[in-house]
Amino acid sequence: MIDKVISSDVFVAYSQCPRKAFLLLFSDDRGTLHDYPRILEERRKVHQAEYIQAFQQVHEEARPYNDKNLKKGEIFVEATLKVECLEAYCDVLTKVEQDISSQKVTFEPTIAVGTYSITKEQKAELLFIGKVLGQIQKQLPTVGTIVGMDGKVHRVKLESGYKAITPFVKVLQEWSKQKPIEPPDLMLNKHCTSCQFRDLCRDQALKENNLSLLDRMTPKAVQKYNKKGIFTVLQLSYLFRPRRERKQKTKMPVVKHSLELQALAIKEQKIYIQELPKLGRKTVEIFLDIEGIPDQDFYYLIGVFVCDDERNSYNCFWADTVHEEEKILRQLIEKVSEYPEVPIYHYGSYEIRAFNELSKRYAVNLDQITKRLVNINSYIYGRIYFPVFSNSLKTVGAFIGASWTSSEASGIKSLVWRYEWEQTFDQNLKQELSTYNREDCLALKHVADVLTKIFNNDNKYLNTEIHSVSEIKIDSVYRFGNTKYAFEDLDFINKCAYFNYQRENIYFRDNKKKKTRSSNKRNCNSCQNHFINKTIEIPRVLECYKCGSSKLYRSTKKEKIVLNLKFFRGGIKKWVVKYKADRLRCYSCYHSFLPAEFRNITSKYGYELYVWIVYQHIALRQPYSKIQDCLREVFNFYVNQSAMDRATEKLAMYHKATYENIIKKLRNGNLIHADETHINIKGAGAYVWVFTSLEEVIYIYSPTREGSILEDFISGFNGVLVSDFYSVYDSVRCSQQKCLIHLIRDMNDDLLQNQFVNEYKEIVKEFSILIRSIISTVDKYGLKKRHLYKHKHQTENFFKTIISNQYSSEIAIKYQKKFKAYQNKLFTFLDYDGIPWNNNNAENAVKGFAAYRKLADGSFTENSIKDYLILLSVYKTCKYKEIDFLKFLLSKETDIEKFSGC
């Protein structure tokens, strides 16, 4: 295998991006070269030819380089240096004067470049040339020369740079011998805009959801996140934690950009506001944008967009050459002077640097401009997070609706247009630049308008939700998920409280096995599109409904089509029934009528179809839109939204008796778990209360969180109520068991925040030891009073110790009061059989509703939520009793107990 040649281009590419060097060496796809580096390369070649020609005229002894005559000459031109797999081109090699005593012959490299200023990449190229030359002449050159487009000679010290590039050269040498198994990690950076592989890498980054998609992500930051197991923007979004504001601010905080919050905004496609700065607006405003050539420190175009109530105007100040730069500066000063005290908006720091340089260059006082400059980007950076990867004007502007005439419009593209104009003086290119500048000013105004509307909370026209960071709840007790515990005992207790663990290992340990039952839209409903499975002739009526006469005759023939489903042992199929009846007329009273049986067919959908809709919606949590799609695609039925609502309403009304029976059974039982959760009813807050035992579940709607619902439901209940520490439950007159897992989580959270309060730590430790000993008994024998009663003495001693101790810390006193207030409600389960020590049964029931709430929250009406909760209660109860919900609905039975006994 022939070794790959490591050229200067490959080395410079590696210094910019290792992946680019890899693609240059091993990829067949050479990408698409951007116009700007192509232009720089063309300029370089022209400059090289001119420089070598001029150099040879001065140094007639200069000769073409040959590796065999290196020691025979003093000056060489167009030298291609080769050593092993390394190859570097140098325009001129100049012999270095040595002491008479030294016998070594050494040379220094010189390169001519296609830019006016010297870049890091050109210095890296010179270092690589020096490295290769050093291996040839057995001594590294200490100095090299770079000649700019203006003929200026830049002497570059090389000694300090060799150590930095040695690892790069070593890696590339290894690559030349053997291709790496995997390419280097993808890392987008500032060089990507002009890279020939930009589209390839960008597509790959989007596919991977790569961290480097974020504009301010550095290799060091990527490495830090990778060590934490974070490799994608999505994963990074989960790291965001809102910080609490300090009560006393001694100085203005430094504004920092949060990569985690930026990732969260992208994941949720929301605008997040960290801080809401007010952008002071005036009736007259100026929006400024400057175009320049950084390589020459030349500013050739200054665009000013003046916006006032009467009219808007755009002024473009253009410089054909560097000599006209001062002229357009003074034109700008004259224009701005017409609007004293008017703010001048710009985006980023480029304009500020431009004015500082121009002020020094032409000895002009620009205070009247610089004092009025307002950087719009400073109102976004670290304060407002749009769901985009970058805060550049193009990215933010495009997100909020700004547009540019050219799809290629960018800063680097404007350099290409300017260079092409300098070569051709094409007025279309000049107009292209002027249009680009004007559209930048308009985009800047659009961004300022959006920021003002966000501050005024006037964001109706935005298609994106806007949220304050303070609204984000992370690791809250209101979220389902795993909790990190400070003590192993607490973690053990929490695991034993899991719903499935308790249900399978504790409650039903001694119970017998439960019985288990064997297990185009309008045209869609046209008669012509459905095969009639059955035709039913409704018998004629023998007497007139009005006068009772038997003298009747048929006036017309009527038909009705009912779309339905038929369930059988092997599955389900479409079932269409046609009903026929005679419209009769009475000879005596001339009354016209249809048979009552025919008139009672009020819906074009059958009961079984309604059952199937409800089963999909309640049990399988399918939204109506998905059910509609399924009916249309599978059965060729089109069922509109109102019919879907009617199905839920009809079955909820039919099973109202089932719902009442469940409530009655819960009240007559010995255990009720209670909890509540929040919902939105057309934007207004409301609550759903959950009451459950081990086999029954009831959901009740309430417009408020007040305790009247609780009191009405618990009325007549003589068992034990298990609940959390919400104060409404304290007023209930029945035996109560407070959820110990809620208490443990609260104590653990407080312990993590008060880790150095030893007296509180001791309280948590003693409580966790007590609970663990009790849970171990439960785990071994179940919830049996005869086994649990032995712990009564331990609990009494615990309360006695905690209540009698004298504590000094605020957190310890807080829990001392809590234990004193609830000492009769924390260990009630020790006095009963089958009473759990936590409220996870209710929380599990809440999850059943919460899953649906994610899909439909805010779209409920009061009637629809009540109907839904009736059917959800029936479904959950059937599930707890291991009864097939679909078969129960199809049976038309209203008594679950009676159905389960069939």
Image: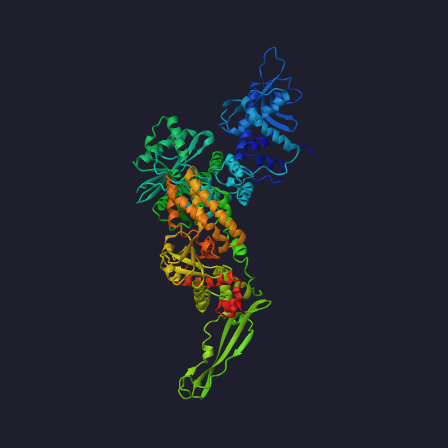
Instruction: Depth check: give the residue in front, 728 or 321.
Output: 728
Along the horizontal axis of the image, is 514 left or right of 725? right
Q: Which quadrant of the rendered structure holds the N terminus?
A: top right
Color theme of the render:
rainbow
Outermost top residue: 100
Say which quarter of the image contains residue 67: top right
In this view of the protein, which residue sits in the foreground, 340 or 723?
723
Q: Is residue 838 above or below residue 25?
A: below
Tally of numbered tags:
0
Where is 774 relative to 656, above or below?
above
Q: Residue furthest right?
A: 1
Location of residue 749 by image quarter: top left
Does residue 407 appear anywhere in the picture? no
Give the position of the C terminus as an image quadrant.
bottom right
Please indicate whether residue 750 sits to the left or right of residue 9 in the image: left
Across and down, in percent, residue 48 comes to 56, 27
Relative placement, left or right, of 405 versus 33 is left
Residue 328: x %, y % from top left: 38, 32
Q: Can residue 596 be seen in this view?
A: yes
96 or 115, nearer to the observer: 96
Examine the rendered structure and indicate whether residue 616 appears above or below residue 223.
Answer: below
Residue 896, above or below 134: below
Q: Where is residue 368 in the image (x, y as percent from the top left)?
A: 32, 32
Instruction: From the top left corner, tell me how far across and down residue 556 is, in percent.
Output: 47, 82
